[in-house]
Amino acid sequence: MIVEGKKKIWSEYQKDIPDDHYFYVRSCIRQNFFPASEKVFLDIVRDRLGLDFFETPHHTTCGGIAYHSDSIPQETLMTIVARQFALMTEAGYENYVCSCITSFGIYNEIINTWFHYPELEAKIRELLWEASKREFKIPKSVVHASDVIYKLRNKILESGKYRLVNKTTGEPLRVVEHIGCHYSKMFPSKGVGGAEYPYVLTGMAEAWGGTVIDYPERRHCCGFGFRQYLVQANRGYSLSNTHKKFESMAPFKPDMIITNCPGCPYFLDRWQYVIEELEGKTYGADSKGIPVFTYEEVAGLVLGYDPWDLGLQMHQTAVEPLLDKIGITYNKEDKYKI
């Protein structure tokens, strides 16, 4: 294929990510799984890079988990989200950035639905006004927080202290990137690179010195799947999905996994412990697991944050092997300091 033709095709997978002035909304579950990630994100964009990211204490869950678990109807979900948009409107912002992949999918689904069914949008506006006397504007831009870090990846590198490189060999670390299903599979045009060539995490890893592994189950679900895990009787399906991914990536000997979804790092991290208990099998070097990170944690490591300030002590699969490969200094005793 001619080079120009390739460029044209790739241009269709690009995404406009505003430079500044965002209304930021947190994830309801990420704060429990990896509590420092969102704090680090805000510290990087606000304090390190001086950007305008506003958040409000009046924000609530988007309702996505309840919706995908068939606990609430779509109109209830839409009214909850309409209130979020109203908070953004009242604060004077029009660029909406969310921490959660499920929320990202929900916002795009709702906006797309309203575009095709304006009478439904009108009904939701009435319901919101009746419930809270609030009005809203649809965001001019909806992006995921990983889009923002992707856009800032080179600035982060410029201010960085470390790179994703083995300090002993000088070789790039072998990185598995895992994209949350709701980031680009629902609405491919909304994610960097679409569903076929998602580049948001690959772009970070490569900019920061790593090399990304391509393996057969690269786009396979992490195993969360809502009903696969939330219904206790189905949790074997969740574990089998994760097991399938690890069996597929193991021959490529990854040094680390980077994710951009609340559930994915949790399951890729925790299920390794379960597999080890059930089968006595580990997938990392020296009979250890493969460390799993959120993209904010990796950005923080590159910038030289203390690993324990990043909340890495919350991970069940030990992160120290990766820290040692990079040459990051840390105090072992501080890991469990209260």
Image: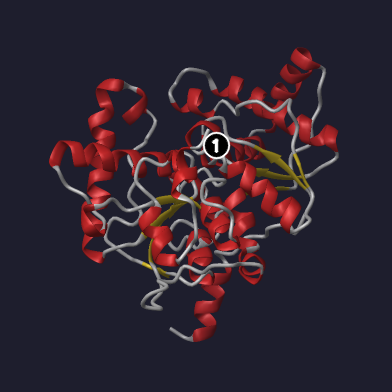
155 on left or right of 249: right
Q: In this rendering, is residue 318 above or below 61?
A: below
Q: Amino acid at mark 1?
A: Pro
The image quadrant of residue 286 is bottom left
Q: Which residue is mark 1?
A: 35
Q: According to the image, what is the colour scheme of the structure? A: secondary structure
Measured from the top left, where is residue 182 in percent x and y?
A: 48, 43
Q: Which residue is farthest left? A: 279
Image quadrant in which the N terminus is located: bottom left
Q: Dot 1, crowdedness within 10 Å: few (<14), some or many (≥20)?
A: some
> Furthest residue to the top?
130
Which residue ends up furthest to the bottom in the rendered image?
2
Residue at 55% in and 62% down: 302
Between 116 and 30, the residue placed more toward the observer is: 30
State the SS at label 1: loop
Nearest the eye: 304 or 274: 304
Q: Give percent across and percent down for residue 65.
A: 49, 27
Q: Residue at x 64, y 39 (%)?
A: 111
Return the x and y of residue 26 as percentages of the image width and height: 63, 36
Q: In the image, what residue occupies the spot 48% across and 40% down? A: 262
Mark yes or no: residue 3 visible: yes
Image side of residue 153 versus residue 282, left or right: right
**Residue 152 rendering spot, x and y as whole percentages:** 65, 63
Q: Residue at x 65, y 35 (%)?
A: 114
- Residues 274 and 112: in front is 274
Please tell me how many numbered marks the rendered image carries.
Answer: 1
- 70 relative to 297 in the view: left or right: left
Closer to the camera in the image, 185 or 317:
317
Residue 120 against residue 132 in the figure, above or below? below
Q: Is residue 142 visible?
A: no
Q: Quadrant of residue 148?
A: bottom right
